[in-house]
Image (tube, rainbow, N blue to C red):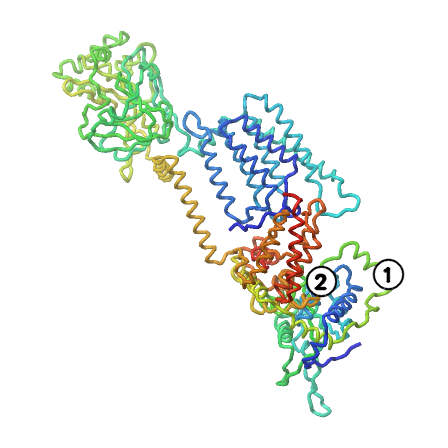
Amino acid sequence: MTTATAPAPFAKTLFRLPWSAEAAIFVAYAALLINDQRYALIGAFAVLLHISRYFALRIPQRSWIAWIIRIAAYGLIGSTAGRNDQGNVSLFDPATVDAFGVICAVEIVIQMWRERPGGSPPGAITIALAALVLSAASTTYDTTYIRWLAPLYIVFTMLSLRSYTRRQNVVQSGAATRPNWRVLGARGAALLLGLGAGFVVYSAFVTYHDKINQIGDNVMTRQHAPERSALSSSPSLGDSFDNDGSPSRVLRIKNLIGVAHLRGLVFDTYKHGSWSPTLEARKFFPAGDRVLLPNARGARAHVTCFADGLHILVAPLNVAGVGGPELGSIERSAEIGNPLKTDVGAPYYYDLILPPNEENQGILCATPTPEERQHCLNVPPEITPEVRALAQKIAGNEPDDRSKVQAVTNYLISNYSYSLNVHIGKGDKVSEFLLHQKAAYCEYFGSAAVILLRCVGVPSRYATGYYAHEGEAGGETVVRQRDSHAWAESWIEGVGWVTVDATPGGGRPDKLYPDTPAGMKIWETLADKITDIREWLAQFSPAALGGAAFGLLLLYAGVRALLARRRGGRTVLRESDYTPIDEELRQIAARFETVLKRVNAPCPPARPWGEHLKKLTQLPKAEQPDLDFERADDFVRCYNLLRFRRDADPALRRETTDLIDTLERGLTGSRR
Amino acid sequence: MTMEIERSTTPGAAAALTQSEFAEIVSRVEENLGLVIRGKSESIRLVMVALLAGGHVLLEDVPGTGKTTLAKSLACSISGIFRRIQFTPDLLPADITGTSFYRPADGTFEFREGPVFANVLLADEINRTSPRTQSALLEVMSENQITIEGRRKDLPQPFFVIATQNPTEFHGTYPLPEAQLDRFAVRVTMGYPDIAHEMEILTSHHDHDPFDALKPRVNGEDILAMQERVKTIKFDTSVAEYVLKIVDATRKDARLRLGVSPRGSLTLYRTAQARAAIDGRDFVLPEDVRALAIPVLAHRIMLDTKAKYGGVQPNQVIEEILETVAAPR
């Protein structure tokens, strides 16, 4: 508990910052305020700092009040720290640096109002903190004010160092006012060394700030730094594919049952081995919750996406609804498979409504317009006539679209094999694959399926996404970077859009890679727990969280106070706890207390008057209160006889009363 | 010069000593001690307070600071018997209290008194002897008598023990535990003198020992009378409450495993009376209690482990308690 002692102007028990140190701190504060006008409260810090020299009240050393103030202040200030485009806290964002500077500014005030161990002055720490405040304020492109304020700060700091070197309590005859040049020199050297070291560290920070930022993001974000998505915005068929099989998680989905193909993007224009249009070429519009989550029925799956880059909301083709409270905005394209996008940085969360019907035509399955249909039937001129002939041979005689799709799929699976070694020389990639290579990876199979189906009149498009296969205990499915896959989507009359995966079974992600090591799964489980907590917290507004935190702090403070009281913590006992004295004497005592207060020398409750007067007389002349000490001593002597000796002599009482009258008269015409 | 003084049982002896006589005697003794012990008026005053309160003193200090000199000077000043016991690990209780020797000539036992039979006893380095031997002395201090072979022997009066303990050495020592430190009225730390006073020491020892110039200033009977007078010093209820509130605060302080015992509160009570008497008053002020709180109480409390290893000192705890307990006005 705070020990409330009455204010006392005694210099020897109260450290005051030298005027130059205070000026240096004000300069640093001013620099920060000019840098970032959001922190107008810095003015209040300056006032609090200054008034600390007029009051003896201090937060005791072991009190938790200082920590309460710190947590509240740091939390409030830290919440204004800057976030980069991905929504992660950036160490080098100007707002973050400013927040750090304000935290240092708050700490200066706390240090001045805190009781120091052994009464030592907080000079060194305030110098260091003020330097940090100025450094934070200097991170600005507008250097005009820094050019003036920084030298001013250094001048004031150097002046203040001189004050700190003077020992106040050592009596050295003839040398009381001579500064200690050795100490001054040592401290000046330390200051210069600190500045130099700070410059080196700062330069290193500036040079390597990207890497440092990455580390900071890794530490401060909910997961590891977001992985780049394996989905390309403009896929193209290449030669040998060196798939390193990255096991980094892309998605974590709860309650995903019976779904394997999670579609990301769809392309409908093939040209010389590449699919387009790119994501950037498409128009996206705000989707709105009403569009995405109408009265959708089905199982609800919850997706956590760790991948970044495209901000695509990966979903099965038959999804009935997509949404989530965390998503700031969902954008949707009205064309080419209606992909969904969000501007929220990874990791982000959303729900999928999965109907039981695999071929449900949901929000990703808009009926193609005649133009779109034509696009999806277009066989590019570079496709050789042999390929067209092959398509006719495979599925030309099938009665309907569904059987054509089946025929093409079976043909590709049965007659072609999966291989990462592809060497296509000259010529069209798909044609060469179909006619000569006959072994390639999923992108070729997907592209080939699209081309063949288009050749037999089935509108088809090329889809990229992920193949979900790694189910875990608890109904969760994990999708990793290496599970990226490509397939086709075809429009079947009377049914709608369907997924067509023509990659042979051995080439699908579930067959290609070994099981994920158990250790990795354990690590992912732990990380997920933290993610779940963060996700749970995200549903509450900052005001609610702040209120809850404040409530917890109050509860903690109350419990501590209760325990301290039960243990018999120190309490200040009042004068009234003693055996009462007669009323007249009590009034005389009150009058003397008033006299002391009026001369700005109130007596602390724990100190007897005699001791108090003795201490006052030991002060330097300039600091002694304007009090008739001789009469005050006489008064105290007489009062003590009445009070503690219980002297009943009426003459003594009259003398005591006369003395207090005299003391009171001595106050008129003096200060206040 | 030694004189064994019978304990005065005459009630009137106390009343015969006026306040001015009391103050004058104290002044003479302190002045006498001041010839030898330079720059330690506060320590001398504390020793006088303990003597007049009927208590004993523990001097805790490094070697060479004048502990033995102070004890010898005090003994000389009150014309009493001075004995010194240098405690060693092989010292036995009988070496303190005395033993009976067999006389073959007539087949009887003769009791030879131990060094404890003195007016002023210097128990030097009490922490160097075994706890069993320490207990023998401490028992004597509290009882003021010895029982040997069924026979009770009173100690000479006044009986005053100055024990010393070196706080810096730990090897081969048995530091007095807090429960036994309670027997000492005050704990005094003399410390090194400042330069000016040390210069006076050097100067005064230039060609003679100042101790040789000491003369008795008071006899034992007067000391006893002064002790009786101390007991008559008025103690207002509110000041007594103040003492109890301070003591109670030590018992409730979370940092203390052991607070002050009733013996401690009684000692503070008595020493406050002694201080008031020395100051020329016949009543106690709260200032007396505050001035004596640390020397009287600090060695009686026991810090808990967390406070001890957190760097908290007993003096600091008492100081903080004094700042939190309102003084009566």
On the image, which quarter does residue B97 sit in?
A: bottom right
Q: Where is residue A588 in the image (x, y as percent from the top left)?
A: 60, 57
Q: Is residue A91 visible to us here?
A: yes
Q: Can residue A104 be seen in this snapshot?
A: no
Disc 1 marks a residue whose amino acid type is His
Q: Which residue is drawn at 68% across and 88% down?
A: B109
Residue indicated by mark 2: B43
Circle 2: residue type: Ser
Q: How many marks?
A: 2
Q: Is mark 1 on a helix, strand or loop?
A: loop
Number of residues whose C-alpha sits closer than 10 Å to that of mark 1, classed few (under 14), some (14–19) or many (20 or more): few
Residue lying at the far left in this picture: please name it.
Answer: A399
The quarter in which the C terminus of chain A is drawn is: top right
CA gap, disc 1 and disc 2: 24 Å
Q: Which of A637 and A300 is in front in this view?
A: A637
B154 to B265, vertically: above or below:
below
Q: Where is residue A495 in the image (x, y as percent from the top left)?
A: 15, 21
Helix, strand or loop status at disc 2: helix
A267 or B267, nearer to the observer: B267
Looking at the image, the residue that sits furthest to the right is B207
| Image mark 1: chain | B
**Residue assigned mark 1:** B206
